[in-house]
Amino acid sequence: MTPELMDAGTEALNKHLGAPSNAGQSGGRKASYGRVVEPDQLDVTHGSILYLDDISVSFDGFKALNKLCLNIAVGELRCIIGPNGAGKTTMMDVITGKTRPDAGTAYFGSTIDLLARRENEIAQIGVGRKFQKPTVFEQLSVFENLELALKADRRARASVFFKLNSEQLDRIGAMLQLIHLKTQAQRTAGLLSHGQKQWLEIGMLLMQDPKLLLLDEPVAGMTDEETERTAELFLSLEGMHSLVVVEHDMKFINELTTRGTNADRKRVTVLHEGSVLAEGTLADVQANDKVVEVYLGR
Amino acid sequence: MSAVMTSSMPTMSAMPAVTVPRSALGSKGWTAVAVAVITVLVLAPVLNLLVPEGSALHLSDYAVALIGKIMCYAICALAMDLIWGYTGILSLGHGLFFALGGYGMGMYLMRQIGRDGSYHADLPDFMVFLDWKTVPWHWAFSESFIAQMILVVLVPGLLAFIFGFFAFRSRIKGVYFSIITQAMTFAARLLFFRNETGFGGNNGFTDFKRILGIPIAQPSTRMALFVLTGLTLIGFYLMARWLVNTKFGRVLQAIRDAESRVMFCGYNPLAYKLAIWTLSAVMCGIAGALYVPQVGIINPSEMSPASGIEIAIWTAVGGRASLIGPIIGAFFVNGAKSWFTQAFPEFWLYFLGALFILVTLYLPDGIVGGVKKLLNKNKAEVEA
């Protein structure tokens, strides 16, 4: 090889390296082609963790969801707002397998079809859900609540012979600390205050190590201070987990969207009559005429 | 029963220390179990068989029969507690499982009569009466004690498994589940009433003579059955106690409190419910098999709707979701029943109804719950 050819090669290489990439939206991760699809393994190489398309649900003729489309990116914190009856809870029911839609597709990552799975399977592959009304195991202690939520073999026989190891014990301890219930660990969960139950439920969700968290009105019934702390907790989860937060409390939404890593660039989705009315930053959405009309009834 | 505290890793300032609370049977509990075992295994036989009849300490045959019977009921109540008290599923079909176990034992006992029946034939009397020449297919193993004992476990277990699988898979819950278990029991009763079914129809099985070749009515045989029943009850109690304190047991209680949360935690409630439901049915079947040789009769009245409800009443009166409660309840209600039906025969049902209303109104956690509350109150007063 002559020096001239080598120089020409270097020049060509530099030219190619300098050229803008056309790799597309692969999320900046691994190549999105030429991989083996593993069952139950979340595949987020396309950059999105939840993909709903054209979902319709109707109850006795009432359209709870009407061709809903939603796309949540990996690590995103998405707030969803909307007036009562907009279909927010039904949307969560569809994602978690509680309600079967009449039409549409729902994917977790790019390979897992959510509509083909049952509630417990969806929970096991990494979708955690918090209910609107705090739902904890009232007769069990706070500690036992977390223990049951802890990621472990869910089969009945495994549960008979299950023993906590010290690492799991530490995880529960750390979680008790995080949700500020350490002093209440042995208390029966039914005796906690409303806000504490909300925290316990969030703690139970986190014990499962979900990749996607669906939070239905997580700060309902909380004091201002508790709300503040919840916002802080969610912001700290952003990036590691993907979060979908449904809330009415605009102050809380404001808190979530204007702080954290992606401050002021976070997307907010407005649902109305079962479909997406608007999507954009909180400021954009609040300035949107259609949104104002729906909320103020003009 | 004191809580055994297991402390976690050495506490560092950054690492929060957590303790695992587990209510295991403490030394007091084990002493109580030992006392129960000695009572059943030594005290009762000695007082019944060795102490002469005139003595004040003598345990009469009547009392042995009565307590033996009630211990069978207590096993049923314990089984009911596992499925109702701990898992929140009210079954009104436990009378059926009890009767199936009883019939399994009864078939064997019928064959043991041999040629001593009123017709002096090889076949049981009712088959001779129906002019049958051979035993029907489902009596094929009835001459083997071991085979029948396997059936005592298998038949209620299998029926419960199949029934439970479809019911739980279809997510039938609450009162709907109670109603279909009741309907199942009633259907079985109609089936067993028919002579063609081959279970002695309306009269069922009775007039037993021997068990394992030993005369069934002699005091030592009755005592042996009594001891066996007592040990079974204690064994089941310890097993239930262990089971409800495992993670499996806590998942059951979680299903009772919030089944949807259990599902969204990733558990499949079907497997858990089916396991405890089947276990509960098998326990009842075994209780039935112990009951029949002691009482000397089994007929379709054991499958009456009232029998399933009665099991629920024993459990509720004693106290749900405490394992000693249903045993106390079975003894209390049945003890009261045997006294009442002698003293004021007409008023028993009124009393039972009143008892159930009073317990529901004033002791929602049963006798055990009431005593606990009283003790806690006293303790609080002493401390104050």
Image (spheres, grey):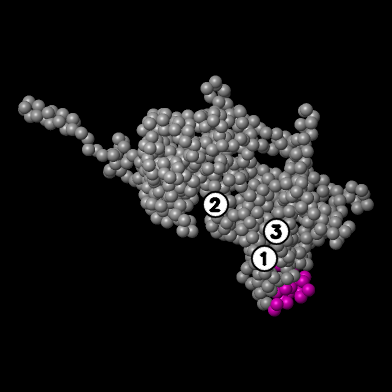
- On screen, residue B184 above or below A237: below
* Image x and y of residue A176, in percent: 55, 31
Q: Which residue is mark 1?
A: B186
Q: Residues within 10 Å of mark 2 (few under 14, many from 20)?
A: some
Q: In the figure, residue A27 lies in which quadrant?
A: top left
The quarter in which the N terminus of chain A is drawn is top left
- Disc sitting over residue A106 in the figure: none
Residue sticking out furthest to the front: A298
Magenta stretch? B107-131
Q: Chain of mark 2?
A: B
Q: Give A218 or B375, whichever is nearer the viewer.
A: A218
Q: The C terminus of chain A is located in which quarter? A: top left
Residue bearing mark 2: B270
Residue at image location 85% in from the left, 62% down from the top: B346
Quarter assignment of residue B302: bottom right
Residue A205 as seen in the image, left or right of residue A281 = right
Nearest to the observer: residue A270 or residue B21: A270
Asked if the residue at tag 1 contacts the one at tag 2, i.e. Cβ–Cβ closer than 8 Å, the answer is: no
Residue at 57%, 23% in the rendered image: B10
Are the residues under marks 2 and 1 on the same chain?
yes
Q: Amino acid at mark 1?
A: Phe
Residue B308: mark: 3
Q: Residues within 10 Å of mark 3 (few under 14, many from 20)?
A: many
Q: Is residue B130 magenta?
A: yes
x%, y% of residue B250?
60, 42
